[in-house]
Image (tube, rainbow, N blue to C red):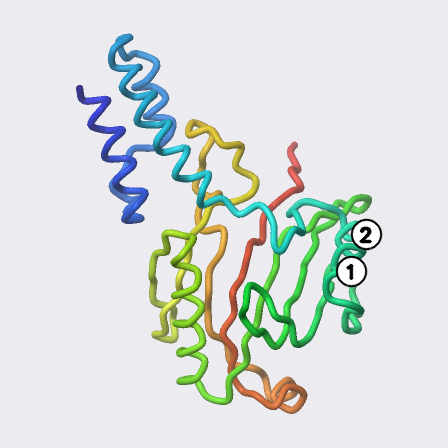
Amino acid sequence: MRIVLLGIMFIASIVVRAQESIPSFEQLKEYYQYASVDERAKMDSIFQTLENNLKRQQVKNIGGISFGISREKAMELLKNKYGEPVYNPGSTVISFRNIKYAGYDFDSVHFLFQSDGINSFFNSCIFIKEAKTQKEAVEEQENLYKVLCDKYELSKAETENGLNTYGGGISPLWDGHWYSLIDEYYTALHTDIIQYESDLVEIYGNKYAARLIYGPYNYIKEEF
């Protein structure tokens, strides 16, 4: 019975994002290993519910551009979707200005890639909505929050500057099994508010921006 209660507590804590009060996945796997047949059956049912809920929260692509694909493949798809990108001096980013996405108007969007020296992987995406004042940026972030809430269970935290940030979703790197879920797979996306440096203010004409950030997700595994 203790195992079943732990499983229920685990699911509940996912919803309220109280990770400090839940057992580790290693502990849960150990509990499962020594459970009786009946207890395992109950646990299987509980964790199937958990997995189904998390799969609905999983981020796999942006507008049909799958995370993990190469920069070359992404470039072809993005050009068909948004036209020519703006000039990018580096090979790890593709940027567009004045993009409408999911009915929302963004001033810019940046598709970022990581490389192992040979292959590249689409691992992050940043949508930006500019604002003249911090108050306007806060309002834009709240609008994004309302849109995101339709799909994701979001948690709220306070940044160092006293402003809110919202986060949620599950990383595209998660394989769909509860026992392989680790902390780095949580908070696949988050919002924040930034203040531009003076040189960027001159370029964009705005001092602040609300951002929606997917990733970065680590596709390169290096080991000794």
Which amino acid does the dot numbered 1 rest on? Asn
Residue at left offset 46%, top offset 60%: 190
The residue labelled by disc 1 is 80
Q: Position of residue 125 (x, y in %)?
A: 61, 59
Extreme-left residue of the structure: 1
Question: Could you tell me which quadrant the N terminus lies in?
Answer: top left
Residue at left offset 45%, top offset 80%: 137
Q: Is residue 97 left or right of residue 192?
A: right
Q: Is residue 142 left or right of residue 199?
A: left
User: Is residue 27 placed above or below 57 in the rendered structure?
Assistant: above
Query: SS at mark 1?
Result: helix
Q: Which of these two is toward me, 15 or 117?
A: 15
The residue labelled by disc 2 is 72
Q: Which of these two is toward me, 163 or 160?
A: 163
The answer to which image quadrant residue 97 occupies is: bottom right
**Residue 64: mark:** none
Q: CA distance from mark 2 to mark 1?
A: 13 Å
Mark 2 vs mark 1: give the one in front.
1
Question: Could you tell me which quadrant the C terminus lies in?
Answer: top right
Q: Position of residue 90 (x, y in %)?
A: 78, 65
